[in-house]
């Protein structure tokens, strides 16, 4: 690391990334962005029956998920491949995997097997439904977890059918929860000297992400339903049409309600018998939103957002993705990370949304070629060129 490089917060950690698809790679990307040596273990050509599960290697999705990692090609279905993995485990802090729970046991890298090689190792397992229980061996995908976790029942228009979210919220949240679990285990290891097994699943993460909707059922017995763009407990909070599009507004209490009435030049609405307090506004939500829609249709989105900001009323535009990255605040917080790619040229990837004052995350290198770092990593284990050639000829690497 040169003097000009930022200090990498997690450069002391080595992560073995056995993951694929999205949840696991999301977890490992967090560590890679903060400087950990993340070694992505991939199958040699022809050994994986389902390659390119997140699209082509030079595609945006793969590049975004696997930046900052090294890649080794290793056939874990061979005895030699498993032996090399175990040598890597001896040098590592964390192993992350998202196979079905029975796969790691069948192939020989259960937590018990890894801990026998390295008592300090932390194994993070991400599955569809959990490491135990009646669904443990079922394949799990984001949309299935969205349905089972309640998300689809509360998403979409009121009275409509179930609707998935437009992003892989179960995958992404499971990856983030796994990273949190690993960080907790690392902190505890500093005290005890021992690793442990961290577990999460798409189903558990999705339920946790439903948050107050799930708590409302558990505590009060309320079964929430889809409300479209309306908030379950506050109004006016939602989407309003403008002269050239739509905006979001959020009025969370009586002070903000008064501010909104002043901003739109309708002081009479503040103490209107149907709208004076939150309970009344909820009861008469349809009439209130219709009245506001007629008012907001008279000016452009930009005019309304500017006016409401001056009156301290929360409001914001509803962007298409190109507009997101053109917004001055988004540009200021640098959510598009530039990267020079040998084949794609100058590209931008989605930056890590965490700011540290001394040891920031960074996007330093593009996703590796498949097995592109095999020779380097194997050499670090003391495996010379002649032995590497034998392993390659045998289909191990």
Image (spheres, rainbow, N blue to C red):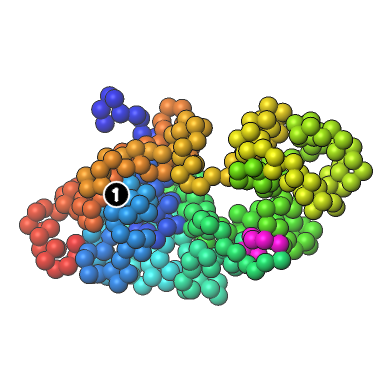
Q: Is residue 225 above or below residue 27?
A: below
Near-viewer residue (380 or 60): 60
Vertical order, 229 against 191 (above or below):
below
State the image quarter where residue 217 is shown. bottom right
Q: Is residue 397 left or right of residue 130?
A: left
Residue sitting at 25 percent across and 27 percent down? Answer: 2
Magenta residues span 152-158
**Residue, x 14% and y 63% (percent of image)?**
391
Q: Secondary structure at mark 1?
A: loop
Residue of label 1:
367
In the image shown, does 127 or 118 lie closer to the viewer?
127
Q: Position of residue 323 (x, y in %)?
A: 49, 42
Mark 1 residue crowding within 10 angstroms, few (<14) / some (14–19) / many (20+) = many
The answer to whether residue 84 is seen in the rendering is no
Could you tell me residue 240's position as x and y percent?
68, 46
**Residue 312 in sight from this viewpoint:** yes
């Amino acid at each position: 690391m040169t003097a000009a490089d930022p200090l990498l917060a997690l450069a002391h950690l080595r992560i073995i990334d056995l993951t694929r698809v999205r949840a696991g790679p999301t977890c490992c990307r967090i560590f890679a962005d903060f400087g950990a040596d993340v070694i992505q273990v991939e199958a040699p050509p022809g050994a994986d029956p389902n390659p390119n599960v997140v699209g082509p290697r030079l595609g945006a999705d793969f590049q975004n998920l696997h930046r900052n990692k090294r890649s080794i090609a290793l056939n874990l279905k061979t005895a030699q491949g498993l032996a090399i993995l175990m040598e890597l485990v001896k040098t590592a802090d964390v192993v992350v995997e998202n196979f079905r729970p029975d796969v790691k046991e069948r192939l020989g890298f259960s937590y018990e097997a890894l801990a026998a090689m390295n008592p300090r190792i932390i194994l993070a397992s991400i599955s569809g439904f959990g490491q135990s229980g009646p669904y443990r061996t079922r394949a799990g995908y984001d949309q299935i977890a969205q349905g089972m976790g309640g998300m689809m029942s509360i998403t979409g228009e009121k009275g409509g059918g179930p609707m998935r979210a437009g992003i892989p919220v179960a995958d992404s949240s499971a990856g983030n929860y796994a990273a949190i679990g690993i960080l907790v285990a690392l902190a505890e290891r500093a005290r005890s000297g021992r690793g442990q097994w961290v577990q999460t699943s798409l189903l558990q993460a999705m339920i946790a992400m439903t948050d107050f909707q799930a708590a409302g059922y558990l505590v009060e017995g309320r079964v929430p339903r889809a409300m479209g763009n309306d908030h379950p407990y506050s109004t006016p909070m939602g989407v309003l049409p403008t002269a050239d599009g739509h905006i979001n507004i959020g009025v969370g209490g009586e002070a903000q309600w008064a501010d909104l009435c002043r901003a739109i030049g309708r002081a009479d609405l503040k103490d209107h018998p149907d709208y004076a307090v939150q309970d009344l506004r909820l009861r008469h939500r349809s009439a209130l939103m219709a009245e506001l829609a007629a008012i907001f249709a008279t000016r452009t989105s930009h005019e309304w957002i500017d006016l409401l900001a001056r009156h301290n009323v929360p409001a914001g535009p509803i962007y298409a993705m190109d507009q997101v990255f053109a917004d001055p605040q988004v540009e200021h917080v640098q959510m598009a990370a530039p990267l020079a790619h040998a084949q794609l040229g100058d590209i931008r990837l989605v930056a890590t949304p965490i700011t540290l004052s001394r040891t920031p995350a960074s996007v330093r290198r593009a996703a590796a070629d498949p097995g592109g770092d095999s020779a380097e990593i194997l050499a670090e284990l003391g495996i010379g060129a002649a032995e590497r050639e034998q392993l390659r000829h045998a289909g191990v690497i």
